[in-house]
Amino acid sequence: MALKCRMRLYEPEQWQGFNLFGISQGIIMSKAKLLHITLAGTSTAGETEIDPLTAKTQSTTAVIMEMDSSNDEDHYAGGPPADGAVRSVNTIGVDGNNEPLNRTEKLHDTLGTTIRDTINLYMDLWHTYANLWGSADLDATGTVDISKADATLIGRIAATANEGQGSGFKVPIGWRAALISRSLQAIGSQAADEGKYIKMLYVDEIDVLNDVRAFNYEILEVYGAVRRVYDQSVIIFDEKTEVTFFINRSDDGNEDFEAHYYFLLWKVN
Amino acid sequence: MKKSDIEEIIERRKVLVETATSEDQKKIYQGYLEFWQEKLGGKPVGKVAEPVVETEELIDDPTGVHEQLKESYEELFKLENPNKQAYYIREGKKLKTKAYTEFLNKNK
């Protein structure tokens, strides 16, 4: 199983009513958002970043992007009932006001291979996934790409898939993030001498400048009889901290895994 | 991609440049416009040409012959023009005077 990531960003109204992880009302009131990252796949020898974007945006200026598919079947309009396969894509990105947001971007009305500019402007893009389909198919017929407006590929939804690339994120300027919960579990068999671990790397602005990254990671590991690990201790990340995920196998054999990370993001100033 | 598609994209990029809300945005959109114009094979519009910087030719002179010749030319110049300078200093650079340049051209 290839390495895959699912990312979802939830607005406060989507999770209010839950006393989620005992988070203070002060944080919830300051535009707090919940980011859920699911990582899955097969561990292989050597450290591998889990389903990263092809290229990162991380601009200081919000600009438009381009979207297209390698197959005309992926297009927005048509019908009723609507024809085509993937009609639009949900982007998780950062807008011109440094706010992480979900946005819907439509593919071209009739011919998916024709480039369509995004409606929204982006300073950063973390992840994409299909969110509307026609009657023809319930996943992408071609590869659905989102690129910079000079055709530099940022992220791709593969043909026959609905989830795009992108497992990491960079805490926007004026925001803070907290890792509030995570788990890793073995899927399928795991012999006594087998295991795997996920390394979450977090590099902030100062670390980038000084290249002192030795302590800026956390490891979750399952090994042998330990098939699931779970942690609720909190790590706080300042603005401009970049978080990325890597998988490696502890010892023998390539095995399947699934991991969940929950981050809270809130506006500080 | 079809030529007509690229032409359409170029038109859209032109609009982006015109309607950019900041200088930074305008610069990025200008880059996108030039990318697509080059893709079409045309010369990018509005691209500022790099200024041509004239530099003095450097000659390898491992034996020092060139340096000796330069010195003897300078001595000759001073003999013929006792009231004139061969070089002057501007912004830390040693440059030939007009009189010395003319002298060198005459004696080539």
Image (tube, grey):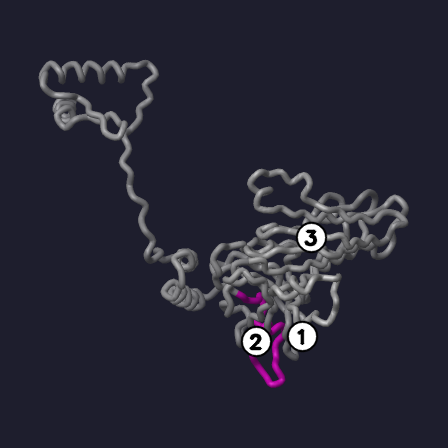
**Residue visible at 63% across and 74% down in the picture:** A132
Q: Which residues are magenta?
A: A67-87
| Between discs 1 and 3, the one toward the N terminus | 3
Checking the image for residue A3, the label placed there is none
**Residue visible at 36% across and 58% down in the picture:** B42
Against A185, residue A70 (above or below) is below
- Quadrant of residue A170 in the image? bottom right
Checking the image for residue A137, the label placed there is 1
Q: Residue tagged by mark 3?
A: A50
Mark 1 nearby-residue class (10 Å; few <14, some 14–19, many ≥20): some
Mark 3 nearby-residue class (10 Å; few <14, some 14–19, many ≥20): many
Provide residue A167's location: percent of width, then percent of height: 66, 56
> What distance separates the C-alpha of mark 3 from that of mark 2?
30 Å
Magenta stretch, main secondary structure class = loop
Q: Of helix, strand and loop, which one carries label 3? A: loop
Single out the mark in the foreground, 2 or 1.
Answer: 2
Amino acid type, callout 2: Tyr
Instruction: Pick whichever, B26 or A53, lies toward us.
Output: B26
